[in-house]
Image (cartoon, rainbow, N blue to C red):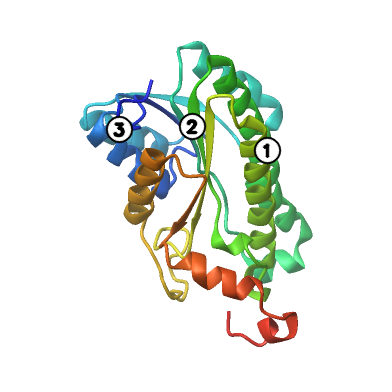
Amino acid sequence: MKDAFGIPQSLLVLGGTSEIALATARRLVARRTRTVWLAGRPSPALDRAAERLRDLGAEVRTVAFDALDPESHEAALGKVFAEGDIDMVLLAFGVLGDQAHDEREPLNAVRVAQTNYTGAVSAGLISARALQAQGHGSLVVLSSVAGERARRANFIYGSSKAGLDAFAQGLGDALHGTGVHVMVVRPGFVRSRMTEGMAEAPLATTPEAVATAIELGLRRRSETVWVPGALRVVMSALRHLPRGVFRRLPV
């Protein structure tokens, strides 16, 4: 169960090597989280992530999970929930892709969509059902401001995040009143391995800043979290710009 401050005692991370997810896990373990499951493809990186959290005092277990294999999700996640209640599920997997390359290779674009959206729909529904069965818990979904309005520079990634965002909002409405809390997190440009070498966008942020915002959102039981908060206003303005004007912006 969560403590009096809304901090989960047990955490399941879907996307166990995500920098944002691990920054969040470290922050929560430093507060009161004691049990962490890292779900991801078996790899040395996943093992290292688990060891670093163990060094902070958490009980950490790993489970094999592949976003691109929805048929395996039921068994993988069922294994976790069978071990006991999970207070928070952090859905943090996703890929950025290479827009120019993926436009020329449609199968690569499909892979981005399947990872970011289809895989998330499967894992999200399975997790939500398990949380509802136990009668409590939070499902935190890492979306992106890229889903607010598709840009020429990354419309494949942006469209997949738009789908994920809409799905998570609808799931939150469906679970309202059940004891399960769904929170959508919309970071802007995050300085991470995924964006290394890319030109930095205005209002850029860090995995640690996103983790801080997630913790605050949990305490407040927020439904939507923007990181940084100023992006809420910026994206509201961009979302309502006429399309002809939006096309001419250097975004």
Q: Return the residue nearer the eye: 38 or 172.
A: 172
How far is the residue under mark 1 from the one under mark 2?
16 Å
Question: Could you tell me how far apart the alpha carbons at marks 1 and 3 are, in whole angstroms?
Answer: 29 Å
Could you say where residue 3 lies in the image, as x and y percent from the top left? 31, 25
Q: Are marks 1 and 3 in contact (CB under 8 Å)?
A: no
Residue at figure coordinates x 22%, y 27% from the top left: 57
Q: Residues within 10 Å of mark 1 (few under 14, many from 20)?
A: many
Residue 90, how many percent across, how many down? Answer: 48, 37
State the SS at label 2.
strand
Instruction: Please give left or right for residue 5 compared with residue 37 in the image.
Output: left
Where on the picture, by quarter, is residue 115? Answer: top right
Q: Are there few (<14), some (14-19), or many (20+) residues within 10 Å of tag 2?
A: many
Q: Quadrant of the N terminus?
A: top left
Residue 224 lies, with reference to residue 71, above or below; the image says below
The answer to whether 75 appears left or right of 40 in the picture is right
Instruction: Tell me the tag on residue 138.
Output: 2
Kindly state the secondary structure of the residue where label 1 is placed: helix
Residue at image location 63% in from the left, 45% down from the top: 169
Which numbered disc, 1 or 3, marks the residue that appears first in the sequence?
3
Label 2 vs label 3: CA separation?
A: 14 Å
**Quick check: marks 2 and 3 in contact, CB under 8 Å?**
no
Residue 113 image position (x, y, % from top left): 70, 51
> Callout 3 environment at 10 Å: few (<14), some (14 to 19), or many (20+)?
few
In depth, the one of 245 and 53 nearer the eye is 245
Which residue is identified by label 3? 5
**Is residue 136 positioned above or below 187 on the image?**
above
Q: Identify the residue position indicated by label 1 in the image.
A: 121
